[in-house]
Image (cartoon, rainbow, N blue to C red):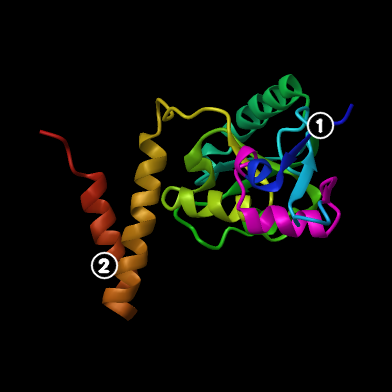
Amino acid sequence: MREYMKLSAYARQHGITYHTAWKHFRAGRIPGYQDPDTGTIYIEKRDDQPSSCGNRVALYARVSSTTNKASLDGQLERLRLYAAAKGYEVTSENTEIASGLNENRRILWGLLNNPQDWDILLAEHKDRITRFGYAYIDALVKEKGKQLVIINETEPKDKTQELMEDFISIVTSFCSRIYGSQRKKKTREIIEAINGHEEP
């Protein structure tokens, strides 16, 4: 016998807004029916699915520079193993070399703007998605009726080099705004000072 739940309960269970769940129901993307007398919407319970649309997963791995490129393979392998253990269907494997502070990442934006090919976006750590503003991206993904899954919530043990690279990208950006045409010289001087600094 089929079991049903109210649309509001379905939305809470899948971490999406009621409005998003309603749009999915109206579009026929989730099975259910609307009571003609009360107008209440009931959704068929499907406990085998981790998200509102299915278990198709897009893997996303990122490093901040080419010096860390070798770790992309390790990230992808761990993501593949996790997806296999969960029974997810991997629809794409995506890698990107860009700072976690870069707002113009072509691969990530491509995934976020075209979520029709995946139901779950899988990354190893939150900072693979972004250094700051993770909650905003998570909310955006949920609004689209999708799911952002992080397989390791703890911070990476050795991330000093990448943090330094991200810090340098901030310095470069601010130097560009402050010093204008003298950007390259000033940036080089500041970076040399940073790299030459020794902890007491």
Q: Quadrant of the N terminus?
A: top right
**In the foreground, 18 or 77:** 18
Q: Is residue 100 visible?
A: no
Occupied quadrant, residue 75 = top right
Residue at 42%, 41% in the rendered image:
162
**In the foreground, 91 or 1:** 1
State which region is magenta: 12-34
**Is label 1 in a helix, a strand or a loop?**
loop
| Image: 86 above or below 100 | above
| Image: 190 above or below 195 | below
Q: Which residue is mark 2?
A: 186
**In the foreground, 2 or 67:** 2
| Image: 133 above or below 9 | below
Q: Which mark is residue 144?
A: none
Horizontal side, residue 135 vs residue 74: left or right: left
Q: Where residue 101 sits: x, y (%)? A: 44, 54
Q: Is residue 197 visible?
A: yes
Q: Where residue 2 sits: x, y (%)? A: 87, 31
Q: Quadrant of the C terminus?
A: top left
Occupied quadrant, residue 50 = top right
Q: Where residue 193 sits: x, y (%)? A: 21, 52
| Residue at the right extreme of this rendering | 1
| Residue at the left extreme of this rendering | 200
First reached walking from the N terminus: tag 1 or tag 2? 1
Q: CB atoms at circles 1 and 2 under 8 Å apart?
A: no
Q: Which residue is mark 1?
A: 3
What amino acid type should be assigned to the residue bearing mark 2?
Lys
Q: CA gap, disc 1 to disc 2?
A: 66 Å
